[in-house]
Amino acid sequence: MGKRYSRKYEWHFDAPREKLWPSLADTARFNEAAGLPKHDIEEIPQEDGSVVYLGHVRMGPISMSWRDWPVNWVTGEWFEHRRDFSKGPLKKLNALLRFIPEGEGCRCEYYLEAEAANLLGHLILSTSFFKGAGKTFGELAEDAGRFAVGDMPMAFRFQPPPPEPDVQARIDGIVTTIEESGHGHGLARRLADLVQSAQEVDLVHLRPVGLAREWGEQERNVIELCLEAARAGLLALRWDVLCPRCRVPKASVASLDALPRGAHCDTCNIDYDGDFSRNVELSFHPAPALRSISAGEYCLFGPMSTPHIVLQLTLQAGETRTEAMALAPGNYRLRSLEPGPEVDFDFEDGQALPELIADSECFEAVAGSQRDSITLHNRSQRPLTLVLEERPWVRDALTADRVTAMQAFRDLFSDQVLRPGDEVEVKRICLLFSDLQGSTALYGAIGDARAYHLVRDHFAFLAAIVRENNGAVVKTIGDAIMAAFADPADAVRAALAIQSKVESFNATRPGEGIVIKVGIHEGPSIAVTLNGRLDYFGSTVNMAARLQGTSRGGDVVISTNLAEDPAVAPLLAPLDPKVETTHLKGFDAPVEFLRIAPQNPAV
């Protein structure tokens, strides 16, 4: 026993390695396309803070168990996967894939090494194993090459399960319902086709923002599409509480009122809180009645499972390694899979790659001397799996603060609220308050009935503009509205649009003209359930309401900190806003703000 078997496979591609990496390094997608079964994973925390990962699967009459070691990789260069088996015909299985530039294309070298645990293992490895792997993997590599040059619509050929006739009829009906709702934007059939034909790895965690980028569509349109699809029964929604270290969802619930106050990540062995602005994400998956997604993992680890990680390497105590690497300019974080220190650093174009130093007390990124390679040092007394990741939060995450500030969400899922008494921190929300100037006189001039209809119509006018600018009306208060926006620039655009379009609104109602007052402020807040709806509480709300009170009508009043936002400043520059200072009720110090006068054109 104990004999090792190995084989090297080689593939040549016309496309450069950066085009091949996203497909061939997507090990979960690759394994699913190869027909490998899903397996169960146990994550067992250790006393030193590390985690042992155990896998279990049954393939026909054979049961296998193994320890999964963290995958090592350098993005665009290579990745290595290692398993040590405790049950089954194999004792060890190692795979290494290297990407080598070759003219305008590249060459991939795939090394597969296995060790038998018993006679059955020797029989498998000495006969069909490597031949079958070479054939299957070669066909998938050929698919990836065609996809990289645009000759295939997806990375790998995949045969989805055929739907039953009644399921197909239901899906067709749902597509019609979605488009008739006004939230389909002509995309419902495309989404239905995705649900029916895509690999499971694409469907288990559907992200509308990433889908919009992939499809080349507006984010709001695809978000509204997915929300309506969940309402109509094509999709199901899920709130995921993402781990702040590995960014993988470790707690998931179907409704906000079931949202846990915190979660534990077995992978990182840490406890963490839910944060609407950073790690509570709304995602989707197919409705189980239409496309069932099986439990388990095709691959726990893999470079494209966490694409924000550009390097992951396990170094033994005292080990130093230098690896060829291309690093894009940006902000990065060095940490380890094990709980411990971390360090953020900026990397600029033209700089030498840094040297990364890890010890038990602190991590450092110091100036290096090489532009095409990076050096890592483990100066601690134990093995560490070092992780170098892009610092910005996951770009495709539809965080709770954003989606709950969208009109479509509040219209379609008004029942999605927090538990009574619960409160969730929102790091940043922009709030717009409006009111009618002289509404009491208006009621006296045109009568209660006409005034009621006018106020109702003006609410619809405001709501349409708020929705067009990616916001949501939180509530109405008499003749006023409170609207929320995740992006301050959207709030400013909405305010300017309100004042620029109110003249057109008035033109359709002779003798019933209105003048609108608008104030905007942004800052941290607390999300709560109030009167059966998601609402906001705190000084940011009070400031926005008080600023609206300083409006003279037809103008827009903006807090100075909002005006300084990098996305807002260019919108205000051509409007010549005037700086003013006043005392506001509930605030001790004088408050400075900007006023955009009515005569200024809004764009």
Image (tube, rainbow, N blue to C red):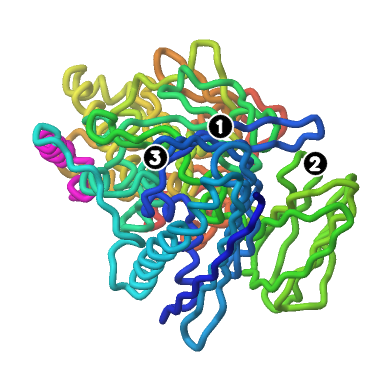
Residue sitting at x 48%, y 52%: 124
Q: Give the residue pinned by disc 2.
A: 340
What distance separates the C-alpha of mark 1 from that of mark 2?
20 Å
Q: Give the residue pinned by disc 3.
A: 204
Residue 167, given in percent of the width and then of the height, sits at 14, 34
Which span of residues is magenta-colored? 168-190
Residue closer to the observer: 114 or 57: 114
What distance separates the C-alpha of mark 2 from that of mark 3?
31 Å
What distance separates the C-alpha of mark 3 from that of mark 1?
14 Å
Viewport quadrant of the C terminus? bottom left
* In-image side of 280 versus 168 (left or right): right
Under mark 3, the amino acid is Val
Residue closer to the observer: 413 or 98: 98
Q: Give the residue pinned by disc 1.
A: 250
User: Residue 288 sits in which quadrant?
Assistant: top left
Observer able to see residue 146: yes
User: Residue 231 sits in which quadrant?
Assistant: top left
Observer able to see residue 547: no
